[in-house]
Image (tube, helix red, strand yellow):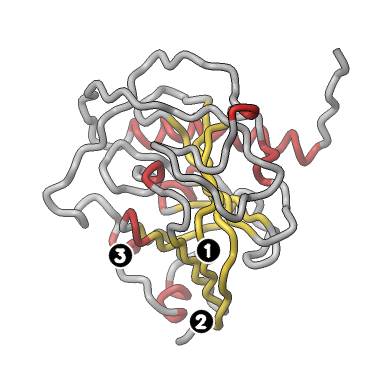
């Protein structure tokens, strides 16, 4: 078998992807404990296409635009995914800075923030920071490769899939084809629509490769509640509109 030689950039990305599992454990260990409930789900095991499909097919959980020829080997899940716990007050478990960010002046007040991601379907509004460190993911979500630019590259955004219902990327699996995602920076507002969603192993960083059109790739650990999970849930969305931010 031919040995695959990884360059320094690929090695760094793989280390970042693998480190997300450890960050997941660290963040959950400092959060209130939620008792697990059996919640069997059908997890897709598919590789992404070389670039997003223009008209993907929506399927349960997270398998949009994949085909049987791309099915990954079945991997047993030793721990059941936890049932997300609904909250009596939808705002109670989210930091205050996640809730009222609407214009460029408010963005500028957040230390180190690069922008805000808003996902209407899952009622998420989260600040974006540079880097996928524990510090960034504790405050919001992080750009995996900070040198990449929205509207030009395939920008990977990592977020913690917290056990607490609705917090960070907890509900990311609910996204399906054509759902809207908005990213607002100090200068522009970028509107994306979801084109595909799938699972990959933590070593498969090719999902972050630039494509022919601008993308965002949302990355989070799966399944919920697993210790140092090795799978990553991926949601990719393509750019449909770019406008200037208003003060």
Cα distance between the residues tagged 3 and 1: 20 Å
In this view, the mark in front (3 or 1): 1
Q: Looking at the image, which residue is at 62% across and 65% down? A: 150
Which residue is identified by label 3?
99
Q: Residue furthest left?
A: 88
Q: Who is closer to the viewer here, 243 or 74?
A: 74
Which residue is identified by label 1?
192
Which residue is identified by label 2?
245
Q: Residues within 10 Å of mark 3 (few under 14, many from 20)?
A: some
In this view, the mark in front (3 or 2): 2
Image quadrant holding the C terminus, namely bottom left
Circle number at residue 116? none
Q: Who is closer to the viewer here, 236 or 96?
A: 236
Q: Looking at the image, which residue is at 35% across and 45% down? A: 171
- Residues under numbered marks 3 and 2 in contact, where contact means CB atoms less than 8 Å apart: no
Nearer-N-terminus badge (3/1): 3
Label 2, secondary structure: give it: loop
Q: Against 182, is 223 above or below?
A: above
């Amino acid at each position: 078998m031919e040995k695959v030689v990884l360059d320094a950039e690929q090695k760094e990305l793989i280390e970042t992807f693998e480190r997300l599992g450890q960050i997941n454990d660290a963040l959950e260990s400092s959060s209130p404990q939620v008792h697990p409930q059996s919640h069997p789900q059908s997890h897709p095991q598919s590789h992404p296409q070389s670039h997003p499909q223009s008209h993907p097919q929506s399927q349960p959980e997270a398998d949009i635009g994949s085909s049987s020829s791309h099915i990954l080997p079945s991997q047993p899940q030793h721990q059941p995914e936890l049932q997300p716990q609904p909250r009596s007050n939808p705002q109670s478990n989210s930091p205050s800075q996640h809730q009222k960010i609407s214009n460029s002046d408010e963005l500028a007040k957040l230390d180190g923030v690069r922008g805000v991601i808003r996902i209407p379907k899952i009622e998420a509004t989260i600040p974006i920071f540079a880097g996928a460190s524990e510090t960034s993911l504790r405050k919001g979500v992080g750009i995996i490769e900070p040198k990449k630019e929205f509207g030009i590259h395939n920008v990977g955004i990592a977020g913690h899939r917290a056990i607490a219902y609705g917090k960070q990327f907890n509900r990311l699996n609910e996204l399906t084809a054509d759902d809207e995602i908005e990213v607002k920076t100090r200068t522009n507002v970028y509107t994306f629509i979801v084109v595909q969603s799938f699972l990959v192993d933590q070593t498969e960083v090719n999902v972050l490769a630039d494509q022919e059109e601008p993308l965002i790739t949302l990355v989070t650990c799966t399944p919920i509640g697993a210790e140092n999970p090795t799978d990553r849930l991926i949601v990719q969305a393509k750019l449909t509109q770019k406008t200037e931010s208003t003060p």
